[in-house]
Image (cartoon, coloured by chain):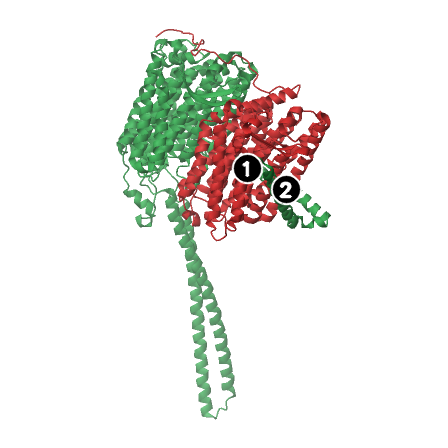
Amino acid sequence: MVEAVWLIPAFPLAGFLLILLFGRRLGEPGAGWLATLAMGGSFASAVVVFFGLVGEEEEQRQFGQTLFEWIPAGDFSVDVGFLVDPLSVTMTLFITGVGALIHLYSIGYMHGDEKFSKFFLYMNLFAFSMLMLVLGDNLLLTFLGWEGVGACSYFLISFWFTDEANASAGKKAFITNRIGDWGFMVAMFLTFTTIGSIRYVDIFAADANLAESTATAITILLLVGAVGKSAQIPLFVWLPDAMAGPTPVSALIHAATMVTSGVYLLTRMNGVIDASAAWAPATIAWIGAITALVAATIAIAQNDVKKVLAYSTVSQLGYMFLAIGSGAYVAAIFHMITHAFFKALLFLGSGSVIHGMDDDQDMRHYGGLRKFLPITSATFIVGWLAIAGVPPFAGFWSKDEILAFAWQESYGLWAVGFVTAILTAFYMSRQVFMTFYGRYRFADVRPEEIADVWSTRVANAESALTEAEAGIGEAESAVTKAAEKLEKAREKLATREREAAEVDPDDEKATDKAAKNLDKAREGVSKAEAALEETTATVEAARGAVAAAEAEVARVAAAATSGGLRTEFSLFDAPDMGDLDEADLPEPARARREYHPHESPWQMTVPLVLLAVAAAIGGVLNLPFASDVEFLGRWLEPTLVDPAHLTASAGLKWVLAAIAVAGGLFGILVAAAIYLGNRFPASKVELPILARGWRYDEAITNFMGGPGRKGFDFVAWFDATFVDGAVNGVGRVVRSGGGQLRRLQSGLVRSYAAMVAVGAVALLAWFLSRASF
Amino acid sequence: MTSLLAAETATSFPVLTALIVLPMLGAMVLLILPNSRPEHFKQVAFLVSAATGALAIWVLTDFEVARAAEFQLENRQTWIEGLGISWHLGIDGISLWLVILTGFIFPVAIVAVDADHEPKSYYAWLLVLEAGCMGVFLALDLFAFFVFFEIVLVPMYFLIGKWGHGERAYAATKFFIYTMFGSAFMLVGILSLAFLNQAETGVLTFDLVELAESQAIATTTARWIFLSFAIAFAVKVPLFPFHTWLPDAHTNAPTAGSVILAAVMLKLGTYGFLRFGIYLFPEAAVYFAPALVTLGVIGIIYGAIAATMQRDLKRLVAYSSVAHLGFIIIGTFALNTEGIEGGLLQMVNHGLSTGALFLLVGWIYERRHTRQISELGGLQKPAPIFAAAFMVVMLSSIGLPGLNGFVGEFLTLLGAFAAHRWWAVVAATGVIIAALYLLWAYQRVFHGPAEGDNATMPDLTLREGLIIVPFIVAIVFLGVYPKPVLDRMEPAVDALIQHVEDNVPDFEEPTAGYLAPAVDEAPGGEEADAEGGE
């Protein structure tokens, strides 16, 4: 039955090829069902192989199957061949099982996307690559899968490529991974040049004889590769950005399978780690522990529902590295499996929420979704309890085992792991409370919308002020004009008075006229006086209007920024709209008031339910009570050279487990106090530095865009100026040096070229004339 | 490696000679065709180059794998008797795939793009170029080799100068003078070698095999002559710092010229190092290997960084060639089977992937009349199939496992690691930068929103699809199943390394230092100590 192993990757490969050829014709949902069927077939094959392997004696559980020789060159030779052993079969089971469910889910999630069939094309190619990664019987075939999944990840992150951010995120993932791949490649070179082969069985046979320094070097180089693929410090920055891809991609690739490749690789090569110096595994453990802690601290301040899960994934992968560094390979694989269950569940659940919430990913806009999304919320809550380490859910058992091994390895490692566990329970509870509990906030007017409205009002008041100020100017110029007129009228009056005085008193006519003129002038003066008074009053009025406008601006501005009209976000209180009404609101805000969150179709909820069952009871895979029930441990034992064993007494184990559970409950309670009970403000824990990821990503971006880019620019400049400049300089010197050579640029070369051509043709003709065939 | 079989094969059809003569005759036929029917020029040129390609396939089927170390299908005619010059052609596992590549690239380049003016001379020059390239790969006489090595400059000079873009006169002249300057040294080297060999052995000959087997000249002299060859080849490859003619030539050449330049002509240098440099001067090759590997590593990193900062898409691909050719050099001068085979395979791979990239960039230029990356954008939306083809070719160039580029890159690095460990570690960082410049370029050209003329760029036509599909098939095939290609190279590569070992006293092929027996391990772990049954 194990001979059927080739079928496991063959199914998704066939799916890929069929969709490649007929994808457009299949369309929606045909392509999705074909891809899902391929994954189902793959899973069935994996189950068959699994039972075939179980049927063997424990020592006989290792099979090789060679399809063909891939790259033969001198002493170097690798095959396309599979290594079937408990480790690879375990991996294939959960990859194909979880993978099939996520494919099914995607049929619902990708509904209506214009590139529906292309999505499934990539998904099947991904599954094929992932299976080659774990089934390959040599490092190079694993590397093929390793880079293959990276390429598919790149395609799928930038799936909606018209958005620059998505395209950038895909590129970032690929390039960051390539840094790790450099380590993987050099590790292969070193392995080959010391062992003479990179087939796993040859490495297993030889690793115990490796010099400690060589084994250490290989371990560290593999670690570089694993750190890239599994998003550990210092190369974790690509994973949060990778959330730009469709959510099923995040679930399958960036949570359940691909990112665990590093853990798989290190477990596969555990013999080499065993032969290396003690500081090498310690490095692995500490990288894992610090990554777990740092990522968890960042997760508590994220508002994007997928970003929380992304940092959580980085953190959980850190646990697995911590386990590997402590020699607890079984615990690492155990946690990998349970994590695949609950993290895939959580991602798919978040996808279902996003789907139901009109593609909104901001948890501040959720709240109280339990009653709208009953299946999603129930299953999500199972995933939450599992990751928070609440017994008897799956995560409790695997995390507890890792913590027990960490305790045995170093109290420091345990302490970091324990603090991370508290933080994990906290941020996951925060997510659940913000999403499914509390006040339904989707219909709320958003702070930024209120701010928009207020800023419009402020702008209006300010433009009124400007107008009023312009009014003062006008009025004042009117006053000046009126004053001028008055002046003129008074002058006229004076003139008339003089005229009247000079008039001959006997000339009656003249006297009358003068008196009339005088009256007119007096009238003109009094009119001008009245006009001046009036305009002066206008100025006063304009001044008043400006003062009023100023007051209004001040009032509106004050109202907009403080003064009871709250614009910052609150989980608990509906936004204070002040004297705003519906009509003032922008269109999206009004549309949201009419929106009804909806549960997802069955293709999406069925996988959620199945994964929830797995996340609830997955712990039974490896129960710590007796060696009889440590199924996974006994199953994986033959693939491990010298795994660590817990030496702690049962009592100590119970105490450690109790402390871990207490820590988890503490995290949940604190989250409840903040996000359900409003006992103290969230800003106390959601620190800006955490929201910005300790500014690590920013620092890298700044470096790449600053000094990094300058360095690259320098090389290009150096090339144009010096290397090429030297060539052109020589050309110029030659040209100016010899008078005859002056025409080198054009005429001479052309005629020389023609001469060469003629000569060559002549030679050829001569040869042909002498040829004798 | 003997030429004793010449008499035997001379009676049958001289297929190797035909590979050179056929395109040459085709060029002559073109010249006498009437100008009244210009469409015939392209048809004739295509038919002739396709027939040459068919002959190359015939060579492949006639090639005996078991005798891949020897020169096969030899033609040998006395040419200039008094000077010991002969028309000596032959093919072995080293030249076989380059001949096939040449036979494939030329018809594709001819059919892919139309001449925009003077079609008669355009296609005639292309056929002359094909004859010259075939000649370089087939010649086993130093004089004949030199003639072909020079001949190829002429058609390329005119192709760039007359049918090129931009500063085509400058680029053509620079290309011509730069490579002429290199070959001048080689001519002196060839003559010195022949006459010094005559002084030692009494026989004047330009025959490659005879000269290589006699190894008569003094060590120091041989080193000087090797250097004279190396300069010619280094310019042709091009190796840092002799590379600056390449971006200018590539950018300003017509599309077919760029494709041929990248796919075939750059290989003249790397092939020259292998066939003439190492074979004729094994001691000098070992002596200078560290220096050449150093230049190769510098080329890998430097070319990749320079490529990243280019604004012109064609220039970017040109600089990426500098990086790729660096891999070939470090593999070749690792002087072990893995490295040399990887280098040889990489010559073919680079021909396929960079040739296809230049084709695609040329098609973008035909549609958009620009190659400035900043003026392109979002092309995947209007042209998804075009984008997919570009993506596959790009991933091949990046060295994604499963595609051809990876196999060659991996083997060259593996070979280099065995010989010059730290240089290989540095060179391997080149794969990171390769991802950076290509993915960044892809993003700027194909991703993002499509605006203006970009939004309406037509997708691949059926004809273009039919041209690019063979590239993609070869790219995938060589990535998944390179064995038939490697198997045909290996005997010749081993023989070459044996030749170096035989003639350099202290030299031993740098290879894996085995720690433990790597064979006959029964599957099933002895380490699986059963700790409790089912």
Chain identifier of the residue bearing label 2 in the image: A
Chain identifier of the residue bearing label 1 in the image: B
Residue A267 visible, this orientation: yes
- What amino acid type is highlighted by mark number 1? Ile
Q: Quadrant of the C terminus of chain B?
A: top left
Q: Residue furthest bottom?
A: A506
- What amino acid type is highlighted by mark number 2? Asp
Label 1 and label 2 in one chain:
no
Chain B's colour? red
Residue B515's mark?
none
Vertical position of residue B347 compared to residue A386: above or below: below
Q: How far across and how far down the image is residue A516, in percent?
A: 43, 85
Residue named by callout 1: B20
Q: How far across and how far down the image is residue A579, in percent?
A: 33, 48
Residue named by callout 2: A724
A627 on left or right of A495: left
Q: Quadrant of the N terminus of chain B?
A: top right
State the image quarter where residue A79 is shown. top left
Viewer-side label of 1, 2: 1
Instruction: Give the CA separation, mark 1 to mark 2.
Output: 35 Å
Q: How far across and how far down the image is residue B327, in percent?
A: 56, 30
In front of the other: A675 or B84:
B84
State the image quarter where residue A345 is shown. top left
Residue A705 visible, this orientation: no
As drawn, the chain in green is A
Q: Pointer 1: residues within 10 angstroms few (<14), some, or many (20+)?
A: many
What residue is at 39 percent from the left and 24 percent from the top? A131
Q: Pointer 2: residues within 10 angstroms few (<14), some, or many (20+)?
A: some
> Which secondary structure, mark 1?
helix
- The answer to whether the residues at label 1 and label 2 have Cβ atoms under 8 Å apart is no
In front of the other: B327 or A557:
B327
